[in-house]
Amino acid sequence: MSYKTTIGLEIHVELDTKSKMFCPCKNDPFEKTPNINICPVCTAQPGSLPVANKEAIRKTIKAGLALNCKINKESKFDRKNYFYPDLPKGYQISQYDKPFCEKGFLQINGKSIGITRIHLEEDTGRLLHEEGDSLVDFNRAGVPLMEMVTEPEITSGKEARSFAQELQLIFRYLGISAADMEKGQMRVEVNISLSKTNKLGTKVEIKNLNSFRVVEKSIEFEIARQSEVLDDGEKVIQETRGWDERKQRTVSQREKEEAHDYRYFPEPDLPTLRFDDDFINSIKAEIPELPWAKRIRLKEEYGIDDSAIENFVYNKDLGEYFEKVMSELINWAKEEGLKTDIQKITSLALNYIVTDFWALFDRAQIEELEKKVNPENFAELMKMIYKGEISSKIAKNILSEMFETGADPSHIVKDKDLSQMGDETELENIIMDVISKNPKPAEDFKSGKENALQYLAGQVMAATRGRAKPDAVQRLLRDKLK
C-alpha cells in the first residue's frame, strides 16, 4: 500500500568562533589533549556564571537572514533539563519559546521548504569508552551550537539530502562554520512519519547521521520499514532510532522524549536580549552572494552549462579563479575586436579550468595554485591557444610547467621553442622523413587503410614535439601520399 511520507529535519551546526558559547575558553572541539580547554563555567563549578558570546549570536542571526527568517528583536535563553554524563550542569542552556530566528524558507529544486526556527545553544562534552570504562572530555562542552528545525515538508531521502547539502554550502559561504559532517561540525537528525491520509502519522526520529549519503539511505530504509509495519496492520512506535552502517539499517535506541520532559524554563543567569534595526542591518550587510544567486549570475554572465555552474558553486575558490581569468579574457577580447568570439573564448577557458587546471588540485590548494599560475598568466595561455600560437597538447605541457616553476607561458614557449610551426617547408621536410622511415604505414594508407594516416600523423607530431598544427599535418600527409 502507498503511504504519504512526511519528513522534518533538525540540523545542528558547531559555529566557528574564537571562544565557547558562555565562557572565554578556546573553541576547539578537535583538541586532542582531553579537558584542556575548560574553565569553571563550562564544567559547571558552583558559583560560576555564563556570559553570552556575541559573535555566535551574530552568526546565528546571519544564518537566519540568509534563510529568509524573521529575526526576533527580543530573545532569551532557556534551561533544557536532562541528565547525561557529558552534560556537567545537568541542564543545557538553549532556547525554547523565543529563538533568534523563525519562519524562514529555503528553495530546493524549485520547491520552498519552510524553516520553523533557528536557535542557539551549547554543545555537550564527548564520551570516550575504553576497556569497560567511560571517560568524559569537556573540551567540546560549551561550544556554540546552532540548531535549525524545518517544517515537515520534505517527502523523500533524496530531497532531504539535497536540502542538507545546500544548507552546508550556505553556512560555508556565510563563513559561520565549515559544517563538516564527518567531523561532527554538522549533524542531521530526521523526523519521519507515514500515514494513509493528510494527518501526520507516528513520528520516528533518526539520530547520529554522519554523512549526506546516510541521511538519504536511512530515510529510504525507514520508509520501507514503516510501510511494512503498517501493511501488517501494526502500529509504528514513537521512538529514536540510529543508523547501523554495517547492517545498512536503522536500529531502535530509546523511546522519544517530548518537549515537556525537558522542563524548559528561562535561564535566570542571562538577561533578555534585544536587537534594534541597526544591529540587524549591520549583520545583513555582511552577507555575501549566496549559492542560489551565484548560479543565476554565472548563467547570465557566462552562459556556461549547469554542470560547470555547480562545480564552481560547490568549489567556491575555483569559481572565483574562473571569474578572474574571464575578466582578463573579456577585456582582451573587447580590445581586440573579438566581442562576437567571447562565448568561444569562454568555452576554451572553461574546458581547461575544469580539466587540466582542476587536476592540479591533487597537488596544491587554490592559494598555492594562484601563486604559481595566477589568473593573468592563465588568461595569457588561453590567448595563445586561441590565436593558434601553440597546440592543445603543448598548452597542457606549458600549464604543468607553469605550476612547477611559476613562470609565465610566453617565457616558457620562448625558452623551450614551443610555438607552433608556421613554416610549411620545414614541416614538409619532416613529413617526408617520417614517410621514408615508415614505408609500411604509408603503403597501408595508399591501399585504403585510413587508420595508418593517424599513426603517421602521430609520428610527425612527435618529431615536431607537438609544434605542428594538426590540420596542416593531415593535409600535407595526404598530399604527399597521393
Image (cartoon, grey):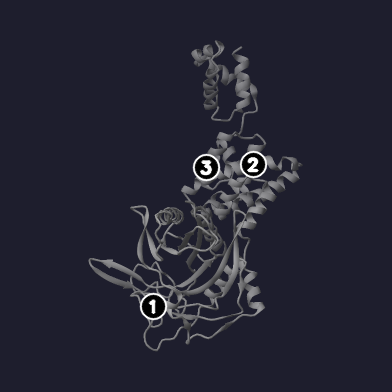
Along the viewing direction, whichever of 326 and 240 lies nearer the viewer? 240
**Residue 32, horizontal then vertical, whole percent:** 35, 67
Residue 89: quarter of image: bottom left
Describe residue 348's horizontal placement relative to residue 212 as left or right. Answer: right
Residue reaching furthest to the right = 337
Please, what is the three-letter code of the amino acid marked with disc 3? Glu
Q: Nearer the viewer, residue 125 or 350?
A: 125
The correct choice, above or below, for 53 with respect to 345 in the image is below
From the viewer's perspective, is 85 left or right of 418?
left
Q: Residues within 10 Å of mark 3 (few under 14, many from 20)?
A: some
In terms of depth relative to the viewer, which is nearer, 407 or 272? 272
Residue under label 3: 401
What separation in Å lies between label 1 and label 2 (alpha carbons)?
58 Å
Labels 3 and 2 touching (C-beta < 8 A): no
Earlier sequence position, callout 1 versus callout 2: 1
- Residue 88 located left or right of residue 288: left
- Front tag of 1 and 2: 1
Which disc is residue 82 wearing? Answer: 1
Please say whether residue 340 is visible from this viewpoint: yes
